[in-house]
């Protein structure tokens, strides 16, 4: 990939550094640099918009803070790639390559651990869904997410529709004075495709019915089994998504290593030229 300036026969015009590799790596990093800034902006906006106590109660990490953290990490890594490729700086390029390799290996390790300990992962999912049900009315975004999941997977609750008794508003205890006592959210209901107006009270008193009776009005199966079955039936799709995330990382690592080797060869050439400038045969 070496080049020589047209019309010049001097070795000083020769370079091992390929402009195509250099600027391809630069634009590659610039794209993800912009994406990282957008991620940080969205995370900061979401964090300032609300305190997200309900999200923190259901998840180990606040999604807004997670988005900010990933965005900042991505920003720093791509910054090294951008400046390193533009300035032909080996130190920055090596930092970029090492960080990208570590991120790729970490993703690979998480995938392997998740596959090996799938039973524990199922237990963690059950815990998250139970906490989400408990805090259903505490956060509007969480409520919309649960409703979307129950509609999409045609399910209700974690293991069954009676899991909604874990929520203080839907609890069936005699102490509960809520109008939603022993009910389930409307997203559990069986809806007619031609229904013009959605009846949001269709889940009233469903927990007091047995499975057969409730099954005529709502989805009685829990979302955990439906989610696991969906994951099993969409392994190729998930594999494609994982591959789509891995390919840009591998391309970045490959381009940075090629550019590093080219820069090193160029440095050796310049050192050789400096040593032989006094040679009359040079």
Image (tube, helix red, strand yellow):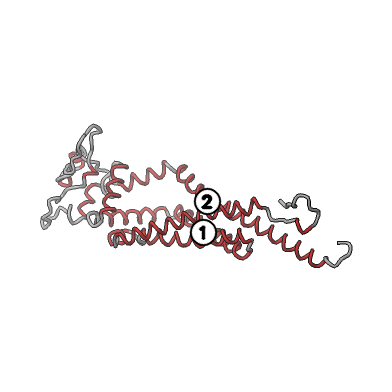
Residue 106 image point, x, y percent: 50, 59
Residue 144 image point, x, y percent: 27, 49
Tell me which label, 2 or 1, sits earlier in the chain: 1
Is residue 35 found left or right of 222 in the rendered image?
right
Question: How many numbered marks are there?
Answer: 2
- In this rendering, is residue 210 above or below 270? above
Label 2: element kind: helix
Is residue 146 found left or right of 257 in the rendered image?
left
Asked whether 103 or 38 is in front, the reply is 38
Is residue 140 found left or right of 14 in the rendered image?
left
- Quadrant containing the C terminus is bottom right
Residue at the far top in the pictured view? 194
* Label disc, if present, on residue 74 of the rendered structure: none
Residue 11 image point, x, y percent: 79, 57
Q: Residue at x 43, y 62 (%)?
A: 69
- In this rendering, is residue 256 above or below 219? below
- Mark 2: few, some, or many residues within 10 Å (few <14, many ≥20)? some
Residue 170 image point, x, y percent: 18, 52
The residue identified by callout 1 is: 103
Residue at the far right in the pictured view? 280
The CA distance from mark 2 to mark 1 is 10 Å
The residue identified by callout 2 is: 246
- Mark 1: few, some, or many residues within 10 Å (few <14, many ≥20)? some
Asked if the residues shown at circle 2 and circle 1 are in contact, with their CB atoms under 8 angstroms apart, the answer is no
Label 1: element kind: helix
- In this rendering, is residue 57 above or below 151? below
Residue at the far front in the pictured view? 7
Q: Residue at x 38, y 58 (%)?
A: 43
Asked whether 70 or 54 is in front, the reply is 70
């Amino acid at each position: 990939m070496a080049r020589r300036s047209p019309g010049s026969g001097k070795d000083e015009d020769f370079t091992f550094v390929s402009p195509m590799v250099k600027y391809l790596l630069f634009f590659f990093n610039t794209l993800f640099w912009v994406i990282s800034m957008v991620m940080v902006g969205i995370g900061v906006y979401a964090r300032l918009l609300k305190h997200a106590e309900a999200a923190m109660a259901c998840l180990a990490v606040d999604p807004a803070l997670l988005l900010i953290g990933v965005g900042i990490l991505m920003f720093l890594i791509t910054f090294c790639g951008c400046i390193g490729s533009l300035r032909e700086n080996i130190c920055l390029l090596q930092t970029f390559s090492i960080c990208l390799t570590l991120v790729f290996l970490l993703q690979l390790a998480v995938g392997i651990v998740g596959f090996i300990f799938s039973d524990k992962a199922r237990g963690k999912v059950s815990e998250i869904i139970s906490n989400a049900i408990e805090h259903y009315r505490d956060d509007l975004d969480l409520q919309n997410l649960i409703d979307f999941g129950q509609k999409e997977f045609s399910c209700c609750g974690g293991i069954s529709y009676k899991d909604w008794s874990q929520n203080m508003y839907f609890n069936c205890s005699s102490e509960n004075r809520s109008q939603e006592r022993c009910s389930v959210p409307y997203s559990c209901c069986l809806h007619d495709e031609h229904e013009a107006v959605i009846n949001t009270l269709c889940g009233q008193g469903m927990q007091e019915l047995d499975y057969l009776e409730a099954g005529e009005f709502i989805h009685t199966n829990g979302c955990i089994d439906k989610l696991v079955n969906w994951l099993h039936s969409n392994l190729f799709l998930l594999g494609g998504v994982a591959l789509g995330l891995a390919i840009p990382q591998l391309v970045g690592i490959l381009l940075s290593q090629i550019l590093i080797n080219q820069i090193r060869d160029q440095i050796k050439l310049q050192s050789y030229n400096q040593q032989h400038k006094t040679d009359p045969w040079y």
